């Protein structure tokens, strides 16, 4: 993945990878997709913290299909950690874009489309005005372009190490990873 040094408007739809020095337990070794970034603040979701639960484990609703209910839930961040946030991530020609708060029809359609991923998060990450810039200036985060493989992976062990060290060998392993690591 290409590293980006300046955090201007291009921070939207990118990932930030926590540097080893960032010891806050909410963010230590985290990979965060930045869904919104402007002068007022920044909002994103941690991509590499599965909770071990599915949507059906967390939400009771007759509107949830079996496929939707089987989606894993991730710890998205410490802000509103008791609330579920579902987003659709879509690969466009040059980037990954997030659609926040889609409706059930949009979610169902996205589940059948290539280059679209539906992710469920408990909570999200948030920074107020100037906070993310301060942390970037302190070298707490490494900014990288979002890669579709981050959304396709079912297992996240070792991914932070690979991203922080710019080790691209993990890409070659994708086809060899089990779809359900619990069956190993």
Image (cartoon, rainbow, N blue to C red):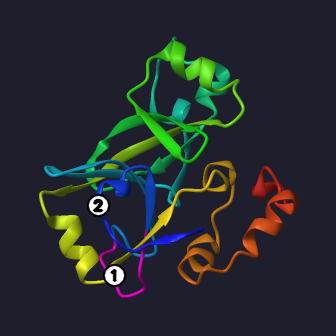
Question: Magenta stretch?
Answer: 17-25
Q: Nearer the viewer, mark 2 or mark 1?
A: 2
Local crowd size for mark 1, using a 10 Å CA cut-off: few (<14), some (14–19), many (≥20): some
Q: Quadrant of residue 100?
A: top left
Residue located 41% across and 81% down the image? 19
Prevailing secondary structure of the magenta residues: loop
Residue at x-position 12% and y-position 57%: 129
Q: Is residue 167 left or right of residue 39?
A: right
**Which comes before the other along the chain, label 2 or label 1?**
2
> In which quadrant is the C terminus drawn?
bottom right
Report the side of 80 relative to 106 (left or right).
left
Q: Quadrant of the N terminus?
A: bottom right
Quadrant of residue 116 within the rendered picture? top right
Q: Is residue 176 left or right of residue 81?
A: right
Instruction: Say which element carries label 1.
Output: loop
Q: Which residue is mark 1?
A: 22
Image coords of residue 77 (percent x, y): 34, 55
Residue at 67 percent across and 55 percent down: it is: 149
Number of numbered tags placed on the structure image: 2
In three-dimensional space, the C-alpha distance between marks 2 and 1, rounded to whole angstroms, equals: 21 Å
Above or below, 127 against 18 in this view is above
**Vertically, is 19 above or below 111?**
below
Report the residue marked by disc 2. 8
**Residue 45 image offset from top left, x and y in percent:** 40, 51
Q: Left or right: 128 with respect to 6?
A: left
| Name of the residue lying farthest toward the bottom | 21
Asked if the residue at tag 1 contacts the one at tag 2, i.e. Cβ–Cβ closer than 8 Å, the answer is no
Q: Secondary structure at mark 2?
A: loop
Considering depth in this image, is 150 or 73 the residue closer to the camera?
150
């Amino acid at each position: 993945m290409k590293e980006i040094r300046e955090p201007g408007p291009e921070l939207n739809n990118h990932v930030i990878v926590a540097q080893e020095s960032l010891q806050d337990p909410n963010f230590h070794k985290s990979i965060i997709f930045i869904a919104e970034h402007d002068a007022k603040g920044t909002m994103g979701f941690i991509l590499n913290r599965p909770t071990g639960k599915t949507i059906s484990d967390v939400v009771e609703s007759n509107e949830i299909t079996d496929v939707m209910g089987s989606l894993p839930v991730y710890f998205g961040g410490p802000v509103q950690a008791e609330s579920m946030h579902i987003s659709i991530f879509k690969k466009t020609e040059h980037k990954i874009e997030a659609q926040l708060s889609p409706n059930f029809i949009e979610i169902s359609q996205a589940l059948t489309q290539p280059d679209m991923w539906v992710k469920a998060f408990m909570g999200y990450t948030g920074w107020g005005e100037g906070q993310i810039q301060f942390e970037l200036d302190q070298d707490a985060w490494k900014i990288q372009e979002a890669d579709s493989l981050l959304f396709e992976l079912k297992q996240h062990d070792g991914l932070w190490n690979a991203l922080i060290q710019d080790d691209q060998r993990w890409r070659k392993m994708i086809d060899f990873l089990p779809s359900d690591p619990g069956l190993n």
